[in-house]
Amino acid sequence: MIRSCPHPTRDSRGFTLIELLVTVTIISILVGAVVISIDFRNVGKGVRETAQRTGLLMGLAADQAVYSRQQFGIRFHPESYEFYVLSENDEGESSWEIFEDNQLRFSQNSIATEFEVDISGLPIVLEELAEEIKDATDENPLKPHIIFLSNGEIIPDFRIRISDSQQEFRYEVASGEVLPITVEQMEGS
């Protein structure tokens, strides 16, 4: 005689409420740990890419100066830069003009970066381009901070520090002894 049990067996009941709560809690903890460890904006990568792009563009400007037999330059601002070319007017006078080019130009990525510039060991106070244009005169025109000469030289010695607004990630683009332009991550970042 088979006796029927008033309660269903363990196999037919499914999950208990406690088992479901424990499973949901474990999944929540794992998802929380993953979210905390992910930097959604990826600030470090953005600062590194800006530093590498700046170094590569400066190298491109140096190469273009040699190949075109013109003098190029770069001028920095707190959050950007632009390239210059030395041009002659009809009277034979030379002046620096902003170089309009699709390759040699600052390209803003999603991460706001800040620039600090030392020229020959001295820090330079950087201003926004609009302010500099407003203050520029014929006696005191805008000039690049760094010049790429047509003979291949880059003058003067420079150090450009590129960082995020929190100064967590910092890179340095500098004149080098072996390579003309070096890009390195700064210690402590």
Image (cartoon, helix red, strand yellow):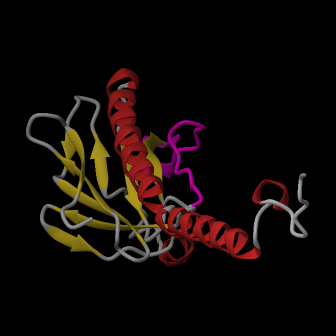
Say whether residue 77 is magenta. Answer: no
Determine the residue located farthest toward the left in the rendered image. Answer: 177
Q: Residue at x 48, y 43 (%)?
A: 91
Q: Residue at x 57, y 72 (%)?
A: 130
Mostly what secondary structure, the magenta segment? loop
Query: Taking 148 as reference, is 20 above or below it?
Result: below
Query: Taking 6 as reference, is 151 above or below it?
Result: above
Q: Position of residue 166 (x, y in %)?
A: 40, 77
Q: Quadrant of residue 29?
A: bottom right
Query: Taking 187 as reference, is 184 above or below it?
Result: above
Q: Residue at x 40, y 47 (%)?
A: 54
Q: Position of residue 119 (x, y in %)?
A: 20, 62
Q: Does residue 187 appear left or right of residue 52 in this picture?
A: left
Evaluate whether residue 117 shows in this view.
yes
Given residues 155 and 58, the one toward you in this image is 58
The stretch in magenta equals 89-110
Evaluate whether residue 94 shows in this view.
no
Q: Does residue 169 appear left or right of residue 157 in this picture?
A: right
Given residues 111 and 54, the one toward you in this image is 111
Given residues 75 and 90, the one toward you in this image is 75
Q: Does residue 60 appear left or right of residue 91 in this picture?
A: left
Determine the residue located farthest toward the top in the rendered image. Answer: 67
Q: Position of residue 98 (x, y in %)?
A: 52, 51
